[in-house]
Image (cartoon, rainbow, N blue to C red):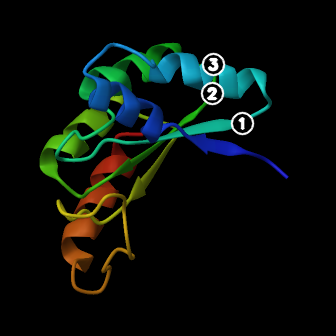
Amino acid sequence: MKLGVNIDHVATLRQARGTIYPEPLTAAKICANAGAISITIHLREDRRHIQDADVYLLSKECPLPINLEMANSEEIVGIALDVKPAEICLVPEKRQELTTEGGLDVINNFRALENTIKRLQDNG
């Protein structure tokens, strides 16, 4: 069995406290030392926890592959194309939810998702 760890709520604590800690990169390093094989982060459109700077820092300094959860948003897609995480998981987002709930409506969003997936694949 292999363990991937979502560190979003480390950033939730930091944002709620209005401080620079706890630091998601430190959490990722602790997870790596504990035997995790990947780190998941969700860059939400409202930036309620993980911030752009976290994504860029983790993409450069995290000792583990990054799985980026993201909405099919042009701004977030642009960041994904720039940092090229090991994996991407497209997820739905609703501003009022506390955490991602439900699944991605692939049927009603097929064309938009198809275009985004092609862009991501074409850019590595």
Of helix, strand and loop, which one carries label 1?
Answer: loop
Tell whether 33 sits left or right of 60.
right
- C-alpha separation, residue under disc 3 versus residue under disc 1: 11 Å
Question: Which three-letter amino acid code belongs to the residue tagged 3?
Answer: Lys
Residue at left 63%, top 19%? Answer: 29
Residue corresponding to mark 3: 29
Residue corresponding to mark 1: 37
| Marked residue nearer the N-terminal end (2 or 1) | 1
Q: Residues within 10 Å of mark 3 (few under 14, many from 20)?
A: some
Q: Which image quarter: residue 113?
A: bottom left
Question: Which three-letter amino acid code belongs to the residue tagged 2?
Answer: Leu
Residue at left 74%, top 45%? Answer: 3
Mark 2 and mark 3 in contact (Cβ < 8 Å)? no
Of helix, strand and loop, which one carries label 2?
Answer: loop
Tell whether 91 sits left or right of 59.
left
Q: Which image quarter: residue 46?
A: top left
Q: Is residue 121 above or below residue 58?
A: below
Instruction: Name the foreground residue: 64 vs 16.
Output: 16
- C-alpha separation, residue under disc 2 versus residue under disc 1: 6 Å
Instruction: Name the foreground residue: 56 vs 10.
Output: 10
Looking at the rendered image, the disc whose residue lies closer to the viewer, 3 or 2, is 3
Residue corresponding to mark 2: 64
Q: Is residue 33 above or below residue 124?
A: above
Question: Which three-letter amino acid code belongs to the residue tagged 1?
Answer: Ile
Query: Where's residue 31, x and y in %?
Result: 68, 28
Residue 93 image label: none
